[in-house]
């Protein structure tokens, strides 16, 4: 040993510093786990919401498809037959209407 050197060095941390380091580490772990839990919950929620939205879109598409089919049937009927429209006008088949227009022009 050297003469100017004493052996009174304490290599352990003070109890207060030990507690603060432990608390900081604990808070860090808790925050990390909280973030992971939030990600898991939000992912589950959005997957369910996305699945529900897909179901709604599929049902809407089938309703639109049915309405479109009905509309096409009505249009075909009005373009190929004689009859009255909902507002009281009379409709005739398109082919005959074109022939009448040609006759009027000649």
Image (spheres, rainbow, N blue to C red):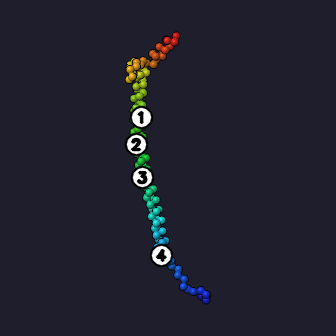
Judged from this view, the residue extending furthest toward the bottom is 3
- For disc 2, the marked residue is 55
* Res. 82 mark: none
- For disc 4, the marked residue is 16
At numbered mark 3, what does the secondary structure look like: helix, strand or loop? helix
- Label 4 to label 1: alpha-carbon separation: 71 Å
State which mark lies toward you, 4 or 1.
4
Q: What residue is shown at x 41% (from left), y 28% (from top)?
A: 71
* Res. 44 mark: 3
At numbered mark 1, what does the secondary structure look like: helix, strand or loop? helix
Label 2: few (<14), some or many (≥20) within 10 Å?
few
State which mark lies toward you, 4 or 2.
4
Discs 2, 1 touching: Cβ within 8 Å: no
Label 1: few (<14), some or many (≥20) within 10 Å?
few
Residue 46 location, x and y as percent? Answer: 43, 50
Name the quadrant containing residue 57: top left
Residue 84 location, x and y as percent? Answer: 38, 20
Judged from this view, the residue extending furthest toward the front is 87
* Res. 64 mark: 1
Judged from this view, the residue extending furthest toward the top is 106
At numbered mark 4, what does the secondary structure look like: helix, strand or loop? helix
At numbered mark 2, what does the secondary structure look like: helix, strand or loop? helix
Q: Nearer the viewer, residue 10 or 79?
A: 10
Discs 3, 4 touching: Cβ within 8 Å: no
């Amino acid at each position: 040993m050297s003469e100017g050197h004493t052996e009174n060095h304490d290599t352990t941390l003070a109890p207060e510093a030990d507690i603060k380091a432990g608390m900081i580490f604990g808070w860090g772990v808790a925050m990390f786990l909280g973030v992971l839990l939030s990600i898991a919950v939000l992912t589950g929620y959005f997957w369910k919401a996305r699945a529900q939205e897909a179901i709604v879109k599929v049902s809407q598409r089938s309703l639109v498809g049915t309405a479109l089919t009905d509309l096409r049937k009505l249009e075909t009927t009005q373009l190929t037959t004689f009859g009255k429209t909902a507002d009281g006008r009379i409709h005739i088949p398109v082919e005959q209407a074109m022939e009448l227009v040609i006759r009027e022009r000649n």
